[in-house]
Image: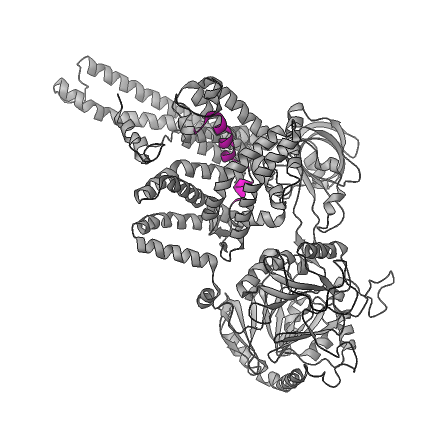
């Protein structure tokens, strides 16, 4: 006989049954409280002294005993009351009544007692689990204080340490600090098991450490090859002996007691081989990498990450794209991967306990218990091969508990399984309580279990197809609960996460199944594994394409306050938006309007953005991009065309600036010198744009960063040429002249520089441009230091006043006063990062510029700066202010009001009239010189027949030897697409 509930499910549109969550009854939350209590107690206990934890645990145990005692008393009283009712004796406090009346009323009289007894039991469980979590945390934290390593770390002593590797070695991403790029280093976690102190004392310990294998060099030009392959191929459980500099961890709450800094002068000395299980896992992972060697770059990098979490080949730009689109969970192996693996065995999870179950298990004749045992073995193998990361452990624990329920024939309930998994994992490894990855994994899983079914039912009631409703609800629920945590970590909110996850989900299943098949078959039949990997490469390329195209959208993400304050604010916003969204779904016209608003916010068409934000301002002539501690300047040369000077330290910043400005074609990209804060953003400038040529300085220093520019340009098929002194070009309304550096510069010898062409460093070789556009004269000084500034003044004694000055070296204190007085700029621009550790810009530099009547704008406080107008009406718009300020005879500034800006500053600017008047004559003189420049150089500017005797088109390279990037380009270089 079919039950009513079965009938309801049988008539449902979905094969899984009716999706109304209320049919399943209330969620089983009995284990949620104890799991959360253990989680919170473990997170707190890791940072509390052991004595305090012991006292707190004792108090919790005593309170739990009292709570259990109270529950026992109440249960006993309830049983006695029930026995009296069964014998016909009325309770003393109850009035006399017939048996039927008494039987009808007794449940109402007993229910408060039952509920209070259950509440006391739940309270006791919470207290006991909290005590267990705190005790486990205290024991694990004590490992950080045990042994000689903490004392040696405080002294930064050298020691010989024998360690057992616990994690796979990985290369860190190089970072830009100031003008240099920090070299990538190899890091891995290990347990120190034997320490030999400098005095020869030997101690046997078990202390967690972080091993950092340092390397010489600083650039991306293959510097990581300097580390021997023996270091990169170390497997977990391997024992090695290292001589290291012992240093304290970066943060006091880190999971390691010390950092062991090792130089790779020789391969690691192995004193113990890895165990057989790790050797098997390592061979499987290596076989998958070899099977993917013949794939395209994205597929080769992504497929090992999708299958086993191996991200060693993922390039920084692809990693950034996955972060921008919130697809990083695909690279962190999680429950979806294990679900796909188990589905091959047991079929769809909703049929796992039924006679009509699918998968390989019924075809092999396996019983439920046999299926559970084999599934458990697969889950454990999954952990070993994919490594015990937080998301992997959570997925495996949930899977094992669910398989246990299948094997025992009990009704599966995934929420109690999740709570039990959290409880067991936190007790086993309390450091997971402080892991953001573990938090995101649990939140996403909880959202799929609690929110997604309800949201799916709501969508289906509005005639959304069942399968589409399920995937939409799952993606939206996971994004809603994880977005606040992402905001805490990254200070951003993604707008394309849901559609990108939906599109990527189409290829995750095929890529994972084919990838696991290639992983399993690689050690046996490598050619077959290569064929499977080739098939898996297609869906992997699809996922990479979704990530790259989603991240390339102008509104893929927007800034949000970081830290816990920003996370809580976003969580509150989500709580408000959910009921608002439910109300909006009932009105189709509002749904259409909201969808259009989201599309406009993501795509940001230029006219729409300009109307709303005023950026970019119409008629802009030059823009100083806000790229942080670095330089990035754009000069307008027509519709969608610009001359770009430097690219800043981060590809995302310059890419976003060029996208906002609508720049699609760059006939010439000038890199003033090879310091990282000027060239590391080059991939962002090349991304999706047509670039004709890259012009660099003549001094190829630092060599690693010069090689980075050449290799990046070669990969994009963009020629690299070198600037020639006196070179003059024109591009649309732009004309410019290279004033510096002189030809063939060299670095000084031991005695110091004695010749003006011998520079003290790469800064002094910065390409210096004198640019004219729309009657304005701009001088871009790069990072010239005072000796080079004096050399520039000596080489060009005719150099006069300018309208706009890009101050040298981010406004540092090292400026040549004579050059500053000669230039007498009306507007001084400083590109620097907020709160940079170098003190840029220097107060005395700003004071000196203002003393000459210049208006000083800086990107760290004003944001991006746009120059507009002509010499007669010079103005600027900044993104950090919204105030209109006009200097008498000087520039007018528009922008949003910045905190701390007072109207008094406007009046102070207005009192500089007497200082500005003398320079207006000089500006008019420059305007007249500019009007004659295209026909012939002004008298006294350059000798006849000199290097500036004719103008060249911007796409024409200078007449000098070509760079190492390729052969001599043709006189007219066509624009080449960087993609």
In screen coordinates, is 791 left or right of 255?
Answer: right
Image quadrant occupied by the C terminus? bottom right
Q: Choose between 205 and 540: the one closer to the eye.
A: 540
User: Residue 336 lies in magenta, yes or no?
Assistant: yes
Q: Among all residues in the image, which is located at the extreme right?
A: 751
- The answer to whether residue 137 is above or below residue 969 is above
> Which residue is found at the position 28% from the left and 31% from the top?
8
- Give the camera-side residue of 259 and 843: 259
Q: Which residues are magenta?
A: 327-348
User: Main SS of the magenta segment?
Assistant: helix
Q: What residue lies at 56% left-to-right and 69% top-to-bottom?
A: 865
Looking at the rendered image, the quarter that the N terminus falls into is top left
Residue 731: image quadrant is bottom right
Q: Tell whether 53 sits left or right of 222.
A: left
Percent position of residue 704, x then y: 74, 53
694 up-or-down from 791: above or below: above
Image spot of residue 716 (x, y percent): 66, 56
Q: Position of residue 210 (x, y in %)?
A: 67, 37
Q: State whether residue 388 appears in this view.
A: no
């Amino acid at each position: 006989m079919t039950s009513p509930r079965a009938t309801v499910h049988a008539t449902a549109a979905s094969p899984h049954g009716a999706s109304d969550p209320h049919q399943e009854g209330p969620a089983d939350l009995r284990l949620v409280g104890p799991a959360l209590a253990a989680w919170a107690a473990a997170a707190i206990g890791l940072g509390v002294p052991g004595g305090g934890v012991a006292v707190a645990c004792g108090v919790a145990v005593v309170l739990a005993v009292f709570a259990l005692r109270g529950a026992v008393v109440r249960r006993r009283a309830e049983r006695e009351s029930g026995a009296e009712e069964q014998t016909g004796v009325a309770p003393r406090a109850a009035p006399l009544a017939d048996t039927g009346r008494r039987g009808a009323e007794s449940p109402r009289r007993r229910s408060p007692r039952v509920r209070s007894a259950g509440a006391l039991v739940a309270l006791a469980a919470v207290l006991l689990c909290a005590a267990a979590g705190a005790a486990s945390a205290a024991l694990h934290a004590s490992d950080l204080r045990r042994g000689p390593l903490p004392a040696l770390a405080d002294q930064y002593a050298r020691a010989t340490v024998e360690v057992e590797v616990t994690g796979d070695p990985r290369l860190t991403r190089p970072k830009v600090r100031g003008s240099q790029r920090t070299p990538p280093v190899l890091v891995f976690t290990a347990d120190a098991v034997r320490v030999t102190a400098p005095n020869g004392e030997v101690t046997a310990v078990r202390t967690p450490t972080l091993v950092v294998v340092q390397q010489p060099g600083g650039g991306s030009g293959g510097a990581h090859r300097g580390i021997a392959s023996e270091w990169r191929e170390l497997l977990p459980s391997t024992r090695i002996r290292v001589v290291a500099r012992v240093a304290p961890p970066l943060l006091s709450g880190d999971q390691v007691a010390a950092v062991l800094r090792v130089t790779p002068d020789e391969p690691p000395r192995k004193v113990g081989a890895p165990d057989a299980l790790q050797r098997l896992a390592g061979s499987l992972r290596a076989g998958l990498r070899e099977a993917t060697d013949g794939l395209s770059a994205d597929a080769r990098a992504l497929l090992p990450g999708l299958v086993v979490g191996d991200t060693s080949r993922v390039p920084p730009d692809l990693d950034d794209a996955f972060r921008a689109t919130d697809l990083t969970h695909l690279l962190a192996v999680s429950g979806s991967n294990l679900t796909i693996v188990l589905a091959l065995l047991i079929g769809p999870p909703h049929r796992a306990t039924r006679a009509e179950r699918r998968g390989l298990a019924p075809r092999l004749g396996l019983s439920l218990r046999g299926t559970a045992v084999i599934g458990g073995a697969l889950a454990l193998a999954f952990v070993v091969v994919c490594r015990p990361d937080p998301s992997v452990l959570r997925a495996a624990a949930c899977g094992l508990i669910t398989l246990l329920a299948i094997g025992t024939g009990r009704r599966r309930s995934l929420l109690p399984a999740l709570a039990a998994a959290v409880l067991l994992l936190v007790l086993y490894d309390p450091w997971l309580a402080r892991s953001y990855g573990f938090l995101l994994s649990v939140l996403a899983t909880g959202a799929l279990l609690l929110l997604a079914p309800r949201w799916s039912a709501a969508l289906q009631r509005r005639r959304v197809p069942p399968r589409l409703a399920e995937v939409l609800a799952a993606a939206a629920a996971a994004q809603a609960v994880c977005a606040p945590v992402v905001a805490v970590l990254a200070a951003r909110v993604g707008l394309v996460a849901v559609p990108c996850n939906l599109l990527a989900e189409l290829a995750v299943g095929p890529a994972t199944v084919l990838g696991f098949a290639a992983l399993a078959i690689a050690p046996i039949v490598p050619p077959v594994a290569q064929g499977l990997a080739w098939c898996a490469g297609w869906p992997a390329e699809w996922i990479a394409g979704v990530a790259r195209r989603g991240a390339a959208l102008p509104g893929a993400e927007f800034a949000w306050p970081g830290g816990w304050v920003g996370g809580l604010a976003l969580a509150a916003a989500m709580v408000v938006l959910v009921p608002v969204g439910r109300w909006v779904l009932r009105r189709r016209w509002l749904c259409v309007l909201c969808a259009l608003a989201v599309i406009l916010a993501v795509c940001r068409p230029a006219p729409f953005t300009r109307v709303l934000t005023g950026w970019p301002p119409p008629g802009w002539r030059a823009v100083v991009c806000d790229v942080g501690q670095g330089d990035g300047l754009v000069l307008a040369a027509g519709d969608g065309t610009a001359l770009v000077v430097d690219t800043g330290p981060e590809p995302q910043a310059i890419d976003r600036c060029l996208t906002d400005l609508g720049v699609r074609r760059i006939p010439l990209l000038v890199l003033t010198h090879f310091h990282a804060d000027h060239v590391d953003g080059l991939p962002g400038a090349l991304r999706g744009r047509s670039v004709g040529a890259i012009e660099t300085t003549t001094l190829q220093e630092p060599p690693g960063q010069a090689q980075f520019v050449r290799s990046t340009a070669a990969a994009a098929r963009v020629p690299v040429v070198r600037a020639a002194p006196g070179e003059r070009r024109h591009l649309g309304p732009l004309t410019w002249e290279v004033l510096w550096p002189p030809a063939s510069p060299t670095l000084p010898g031991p005695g110091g520089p004695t010749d003006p062409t011998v520079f003290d460093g790469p800064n002094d070789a910065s390409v210096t441009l004198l640019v004219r556009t729309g009657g304005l004269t701009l001088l871009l000084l790069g990072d010239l230091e005072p000796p080079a500034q004096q050399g520039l003044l000596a080489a060009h004694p005719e150099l006069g006043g300018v309208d706009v000055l890009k101050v040298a070296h981010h406004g540092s204190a090292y400026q040549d006063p004579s050059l500053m007085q000669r230039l007498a700029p009306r507007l001084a621009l400083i590109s620097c990062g907020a709160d940079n550790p170098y003190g840029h810009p220097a107060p005395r530099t700003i004071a000196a510029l203002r003393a000459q009547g210049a208006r000083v704008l800086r990107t760290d406080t004003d944001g991006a700066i746009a120059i507009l107008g002509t010499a007669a009406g010079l103005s600027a718009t900044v993104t950090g202010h919204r105030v209109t300020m006009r200097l008498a005879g000087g520039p007018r500034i528009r922008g949003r009001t910045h905190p701390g800006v007072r109207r008094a500053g406007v009046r102070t600017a207005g009192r500089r009239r007497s200082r500005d008047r003398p320079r207006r004559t000089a500006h008019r003189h420059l305007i007249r010189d500019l009007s004659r420049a295209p026909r012939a150089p002004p008298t006294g500017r350059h000798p006849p027949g000199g290097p500036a005797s004719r103008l060249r088109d911007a796409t024409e390279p200078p007449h000098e030897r070509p760079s190492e990037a390729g052969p001599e380009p043709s006189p007219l270089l066509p624009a080449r697409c960087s993609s």
